[in-house]
Every structure is written in C-alpha cells, then in structure tokens.
Image (cartoon, helix red, strand yellow):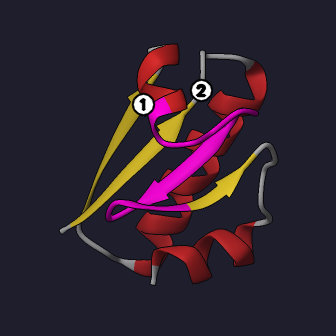
Amino acid sequence: MKKILVLGTGCPKCQKLAEMTEKAARELGIDYELVKVTDINEITNWGIMMTPGLVVDGVVKAAGKIPGPDEIKTMLK
C-alpha cells in the first residue's frame, strides 16, 4: 500500500492537489492511503517551505506547485 501525504494548510491549491492525487491513484488502480497534513510544524519538518507538498512513501515528490495529472501518476508509480 502506498502512503501518500498532501501537505498544506487547506488552501484551494492544497485541496486541488489532494483531489488530483486521489484521482490519479484510482486511475492507476493502486492500493493507497491518502493523508492530508495541515499542521504547519509537521509540514516544515518535511522541508516544505511552500505548499502544497506531495510525499509518496516517505519521499517528497513536489513542493510549492500542483503537478500535472500525468506527472502525479509518474510520482505514484
């Protein structure tokens, strides 16, 4: 099971990244758990200074932007 974290305070960009990531995971048919991390201290512990951030299986894949759908799928593989 992939562990996916969306790091952000709940802003529209963070919500959009969460929606796009869930859609990509469903389309890939992978087993995943998506957690939205909104605590600013936990976000900065990941080294993220600009949200949104995307972490897959403990590795920061994106920060400060919303990757495109195909890019997200590549990050999840």
- Residue positioned most to the left: 1
Relative side of 5 to 17, left or right: left
- Write down the quadrant of residue 18 in the picture: top right
Relative side of 35 to 7, left or right: left
Whole-percent x, y for residue 44 in the image: 54, 29
How far apart in space, not on screen, are marks 1 and 2 (Cα)? 7 Å
* Vertical position of residue 45 compared to residue 31: above or below: above
Mark 1, Cα crowd under 10 Å, few <14 / some 14-19 / many 20+, is some
Whole-percent x, y for residue 8 in the image: 59, 26
* Vertical position of residue 73 compared to residue 22: above or below: below
- Reply yes or no: does residue 48 show up in magenta: yes
Say which residue appears at 47% left-offset and 55% top-offset. 55
Of marks 1 and 2, which one's residue comes earlier in the chain? 2
In the rendered image, the quadrant that contains the C terminus is bottom left
In the rendered image, the quadrant that contains the N terminus is bottom left
Relative side of 20 to 70, left or right: left
Asked which secondary structure carries label 2, the reply is loop
- Reply yes or no: does residue 58 show up in magenta: yes
Asked which secondary structure carries label 1, the reply is strand
Q: Over which residues does the magenta segment extend?
A: 45-60
Disc assigned to residue 8: 2
Whole-percent x, y for residue 6 in the image: 50, 40
Say which residue appears at 32% left-offset and 65% top-offset. 57
Which residue carries the number 1 mark?
A: 36
- Write down the quadrant of residue 69 in the picture: bottom right
Say which residue appears at 55% left-offset and 66% top-offset. 24
Say which residue appears at 41% left-offset and 25% top-offset. 42
Q: Are marks 1 and 2 in contact (CB under 8 Å)?
A: yes
* Vertical position of residue 62 compared to residue 48: above or below: below
40 and 1: which one is in front? 40
